[in-house]
Image (cartoon, rainbow, N blue to C red):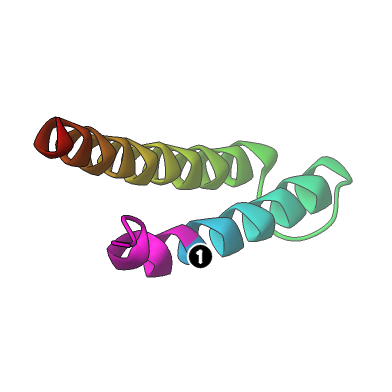
Amino acid sequence: MFDVADSLRGGLESVATRLQQAQRIVARANAGEGGRSADAAMAQTAQAAIFDEALLGAMHARLEELKAVTK
C-alpha cells in the first residue's frame, strides 16, 4: 500500500522536535531563566505550529487526491 506520509515524514519529525524544543524554551522563559524573552519563545512556538499545520494540510490534500482516484 502507498504510504501517503512517507514524503512528509522528515518534515513531521522535524516539526515534532521543533515543538518540543520551543516548549522547553517557553517554560524556561516563563521561569525567568535563559536569555530569551517569553514573547520570542512564543513566536518560535507559533512558527513551529504553523509549519505543522501546513504539513498536516498537505497530507490531508494527498489523502483527498487518493480518495478521488479510487472512486
Q: Nearer the viewer, residue 40 or 8?
A: 8
Q: Which residues are magenta?
A: 1-12
Please count the marks in the image.
1
Q: Quadrant of residue 68?
A: top left
Q: Quadrant of residue 12?
A: bottom left
Q: Nearer the viewer, residue 37 or 69?
A: 69
In the image, 35: left or right of 16?
right
In the image, 35: left or right of 66?
right
Give the farthest residue toward the right.
Answer: 31
Q: Is residue 71 above or below residue 1?
A: above
Q: Is residue 11 above or below residue 71?
A: below
The residue singled out by tag 1 in the image is 13
Amino acid bearing label 1: Glu
* SS type, badge 1: helix
Give the farthest residue toward the left.
Answer: 69
Estimate the x, y position of residue 14 in percent, counting from the top left.
48, 65
Q: Is residue 22 above or below residue 58?
A: below
Label 1 crowd bin: few (<14), some (14–19), many (20+), radius 10 Å: few
Estimate the x, y position of residue 66 in percent, counting from the top left.
19, 41
Residue located 77% across and 60% down the image:
34
In the image, 17: left or right of 48?
right
In the image, 37: left or right of 55?
right
